[in-house]
Image: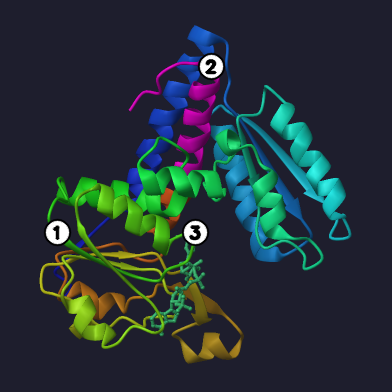
Amino acid sequence: DARATLIDGKAFAAGLVERIAEASARLEQTHGVRPGLAVVIVGEDPASQIYVRNKGETTARAGMRSDTHRLADTTTQADLLALIASLNADPGIHGILVQLPLPAHIDAAAVLAAIDPDKDVDGFHVVNAGRLAVGLPGLVPCTPLGSIMLLRQTLGDLSGLNAVIVGRSNIVGKPMAQLLLAENCTVTVAHSRSRDLPALCRSADILVAAVGRPEMIRGDWIKPGATVIDVGINRVPSADPVKAAEGRTRIVGDVALAEAAAVAGAITPVPGGVGPMTIACLLANTYSAACRAAGVESEP
Ligand code: NDP
């Protein structure tokens, strides 16, 4: 009985990747600059390996240069910092991404701080967080950027809407709040200490869930007709008890999709909503960093 529009992030992301590929090809033709992304992974974390492979493949498919640096989990912080310094200095590399989490013996904050902010395509450097906060141009974290694109495509002008974000992480919740504020929303950021979360959520015209708790947000937390962006990616046992007993899993969001879809006006499914937008925005950031390096205006 779902009546909400399902926001097709997969299709939107595919279109975006295509447009970036075309714009990159033009940048190379007109300015001799081929956008290049370097992805650095330390250790063997299986989920990280999959993310890094997807990033590399999508970048290459878009016609960009894609370098993946795979380092042993025994790599020292000094060696990692030396690699970042060489990538900072490499004019063929416009974007640098260090896949998180890093092994415990490496100070992740020190590593992120070492990336040239103008090559920081994840947008995690404090300089980029500061630029976003004061409204200067900079590189914006990919997941919030992709979420804003889906909201603008779904709703058009966001001015004056009440936006509630559940989650205040530096990589999703906080930058999402800045972006929605820049779109003239009235923004509330909720977290684990917030009181009466269901009532707060029910005040939202735009509800962004970035919690990391499977299906925590229920249908009756949602204002009828609201637009719901579900950022959560949670692995849970398969719904089929036989498969679950075999250890099979599935991915769900932070929102109970079927319940929410009966109330919301539009909602991003998981999978197929925000997830695909994240990689597409990584390419968008790499392309815009290359334009900046070449001294040209990036195409919209
Ligand atoms: P974090 O764990 O860093 O942050 C979670 C936030 O949710 C915290 O601010 C925490 O509050 C809040 N929170 C936790 N439990 C509750 C609760 N019971 N009630 C209210 N708030 C709560 O997660 P991330 O921001 O990194 O990621 C959030 C989700 O998004 C995860 O599922 C992650 O996998 C997914 N994700 C998806 C991406 C994509 O590409 N689609 C990219 C990045 C993340 P407090 O600060 O008080 O602890």
In this rendering, does residue 273 appear at all?
A: no
Q: Quadrant of the C terminus?
A: top left
In this rendering, does residue 97 appear at all?
A: yes
Instruction: Look at the image and say whether residue 75 sits in the magenta stretch.
Output: no
Residue 119 figure quarter: top right
Q: Residue at 57% of width from left, 25% of height from top?
A: 35
| Residue for badge 1 | 161
- As measured in the structure, the alpha-carbon distance from the residue carrying label 1 to the one carrying label 3 is 23 Å
Residue 296 figure quarter: top left
* Looking at the image, residue 124 lies above or below residue 74: above
Q: Residue at 72% of width from left, 61% of height from top?
A: 102
Q: Give how far across and how far down residue 251 sits, in percent.
A: 47, 72
User: Mark 1 is on which residue type?
Assistant: Leu
| Residue for badge 3 | 171
- Which secondary structure, mark 1? loop
The reply, left or right, for residue 153 in relation to residue 140 is: left
The reply, left or right, for residue 272 in relation to residue 35 is: left
Which region shows up in magenta? Answer: 280-300
Which one is in front, 160 or 53?
160
* Cβ–Cβ under 8 Å for marks 3 and 2: no
